[in-house]
Image (tube, helix red, strand yellow):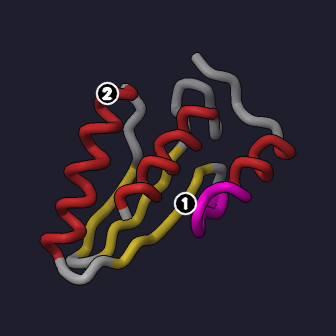
Amino acid sequence: MSDVLSDAALEDHLGRLDGWSVVDGKLHKQLTFPDFNAAFAFMTRLALVAEKMDHHPDWSNSWNTVTLDISSHAAGGITVACVELAAAADRFS
């Protein structure tokens, strides 16, 4: 299990992510795509990465919008793996 990031480390990582914030102890981002197909394609690509990492986001999809919340249930907060998954989401969006 990874350690929960300190506030300082989390702020440092947030500075390198695009448009992420911390909401209720989770990395949070809402993405808007041109249409449902593009949103679903994004989710499919990220799902493959999440499965390989064995680190899965809490997310929802409503037509062209995907809302992501990422934290570690096992660690009880935001870890380096959470940041890595968020960075992967940024690469695909």
> Residue 27, image x and y in percent?
58, 53
Q: Is the C terminus in the top left, top right, bottom left or bottom right quadrant?
A: bottom left
Q: Residues within 10 Å of mark 2 (few under 14, many from 20)?
A: few
| Type of amino acid at the residue the image marks with label 1 | His
| Type of amino acid at the residue the image marks with label 2 | Lys
Of residues 16 and 21, which is closer to you in this image? 16
In the figure, is residue 8 to the left or right of 23?
Answer: right
Label 1 belongs to which residue?
Answer: 28
Magenta stretch prevailing secondary structure: loop
- Magenta stretch: give its range: 15-23
Residue furthest toward the right?
A: 8
Image depth: mark 2 or mark 1 in front: 2
Dot 2 and dot 1 residues touching (CB under 8 Å): no
> Considering only order in the chain, which callout, 1 or 2, is on the residue closer to the N terminus?
1
Secondary structure at numbered mark 2:
helix
Q: Residues within 10 Å of mark 1 (few under 14, many from 20)?
A: many
Label 2 belongs to which residue?
Answer: 52
Of residues 5 and 24, which is closer to you in this image? 5
> Residue 20, image x and y in percent?
59, 63
Residue furthest toward the bottom?
A: 34
Of residues 91 and 19, which is closer to you in this image? 91
Is 82 placed above or below 30 here?
Answer: above
Q: CA distance from mark 2 to mark 1?
A: 21 Å
Q: Residue at x 46, y 58 (%)?
A: 90
